[in-house]
Image (cartoon, rainbow, N blue to C red):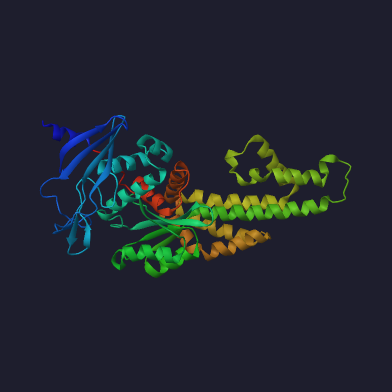
């Protein structure tokens, strides 16, 4: 094998001819002078169309290649400009790098693979690049992948949710495919306009194929889905419905706590255990006993719950209502019809509870009864998208935060969209 071919293989170059190789011992730097192989010269850097030459551009330029052991390697070549019939005067494309990129394809692919596997700090140290460069490379690799992949093809059952990616009410709208488990779309923003952008990309024909949509009860999701997919069955996420009950329980707990606190002012009962001040502290510390599921309570939390049952009947009734609603969705796993019947009984119970937070909750659940029953009947929830959001949060945490949403979306799509990058020649 000729030396030029060996160097081309070592540098990960394809469709290129290595002319010479120079090594700088002082800087521990290797520079390979190359040129595109015949048939790959004078092509538009944007569309790849063969185009007439325009001028020599700004001279020779370099692309960072994968390190050769501990040696930093660069590829150097002429950068002439061509006159493309479609894109005008642009720098000629090269087969070893993307347009406007300062790194070879192999370098980009390796960085993208590392970014989906380990922390951004580790990638920057291993590859000897700036942390902003990692985000730029990931965005570039994903843009190239998305250009050749239709992630929105074949969608029938989708889940929609939003996730905060930065302080200051910075949100992403995230959409997953229930059938494949893939993340199929993400964009900055959490409103009807953002979701309309997704349905616009999907198109009227594919919107008509959507059969089920799971989400929380956000009005902006309901509005966009009703407008673009009126035939789709909307399924309310059971987790969010139970969260409503937990919120109502906490409102009742605060009301009870305030009542006891006011009664504690200026009272001195003979028995210290009956002092309202002691009850205030006990009730304050019982918050987790009320929130947690009964099967996960500690011995101390069970005692707190028993104390509430004996001394605060209204609050204990609120806790029972919260557990009753949770039981409805537990029943749904084995018998949807029985769960629907249990839901109607729960609504009646909440209406007669004389607890303001739960009578309000009963009205809300009645208003959203149809999507709740759809979730029970079709056994769909947002569990898959909540899992996806957890992984996106891990990506953000592993990168120590991101200044813009584009690198987050690119990294999430590469990691969770079913198109994870592979190492070069693997």
Residue 218: x %, y % from top left: 50, 62
Which residue is at 59% across, 61% downward? 362
Residue that protrudes farthest toward the bottom in the picture: 227
Is residue 368 toward the left or the right of residue 110 in the image?
Answer: right
* In-front residue for pair 165/30: 30
Residue 95 visible from this viewpoint: yes
Measured as percent of width and height from the top left, residue 126 is found at 37, 34
Q: Residue at x 77, y 45 (%)?
A: 279
- The residue closer to the viewer here, 129 or 299, is 129
Quarter of the N terminus within the rendering? top left
Asked where in the image residue 192 lies, by quadrant, the reply is: bottom left
Q: Residue at x 10, y 50 (%)?
A: 39
What residue sits 84% from the left and 51% below the top? 265
Report the front residue among 67 and 61.
61
Q: From the viewer's perspective, is residue 301 above or below residue 364? A: above
Q: Is residue 338 visible?
A: no
Left or right: where 284 falls relative to 73: right
């Amino acid at each position: 094998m000729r030396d030029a071919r060996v160097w081309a293989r070592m540098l990960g170059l394809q469709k290129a001819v290595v002319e010479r190789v120079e090594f700088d011992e002082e800087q521990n730097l290797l520079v390979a002078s190359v040129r595109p192989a015949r048939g790959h010269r004078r092509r538009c850097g944007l569309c790849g169309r063969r185009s007439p030459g325009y001028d020599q551009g700004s001279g020779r330029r370099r692309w960072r290649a994968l390190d050769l052991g501990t040696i930093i390697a660069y590829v150097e070549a002429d950068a002439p400009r061509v006159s493309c019939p479609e894109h005008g005067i642009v720098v000629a494309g090269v087969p070893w790098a993307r347009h406007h990129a300062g790194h070879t394809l192999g370098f980009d692919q390796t960085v993208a693979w590392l970014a989906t596997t380990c922390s951004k700090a580790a990638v920057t140290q291993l590859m000897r690049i700036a942390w902003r460069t990692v985000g730029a490379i990931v965005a570039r690799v994903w843009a190239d992948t998305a250009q050749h992949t239709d992630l929105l093809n074949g969608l029938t059952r989708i889940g929609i949710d939003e996730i905060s990616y930065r302080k200051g009410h910075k949100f992403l709208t995230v959409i997953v495919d229930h059938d494949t488990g893939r993340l199929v779309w993400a964009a900055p923003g959490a409103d009807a306009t953002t979701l309309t952008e997704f349905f616009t990309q999907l198109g009227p024909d594919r919107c008509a194929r959507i059969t089920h949509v799971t989400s929380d009860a956000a009005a902006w999701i309901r509005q966009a889905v009703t407008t673009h997919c009126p035939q789709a069955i909307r399924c309310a996420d059971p987790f969010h419905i139970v969260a409503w009950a937990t919120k109502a329980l906490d409102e009742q707990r605060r009301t009870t706590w305030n009542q006891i606190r006011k009664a504690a002012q200026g009272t001195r009962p003979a028995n210290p255990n009956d002092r309202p001040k002691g009850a205030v502290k006990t009730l304050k510390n019982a918050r987790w006993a009320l929130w947690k599921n009964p099967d996960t309570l500690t011995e101390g939390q069970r005692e707190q719950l028993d104390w509430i049952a004996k001394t605060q009947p209204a609050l204990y009734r609120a806790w029972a209502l919260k557990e009753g609603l949770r039981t409805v969705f537990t029943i749904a796993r084995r018998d949807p019809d029985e769960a629907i019947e249990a839901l109607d009984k729960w609504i009646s119970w909440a209406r007669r509870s004389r607890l303001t937070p739960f009578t309000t909750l009963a009205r809300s659940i009645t208003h959203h009864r149809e999507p709740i029953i759809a979730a029970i009947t079709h056994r769909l929830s947002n569990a898959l998208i909540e899992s996806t959001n957890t992984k996106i949060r891990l990506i953000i945490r592993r990168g120590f935060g991101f200044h813009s949403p584009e690198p987050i979306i690119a990294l999430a799509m590469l990691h969770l969209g079913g198109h994870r990058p592979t190492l070069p020649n693997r």
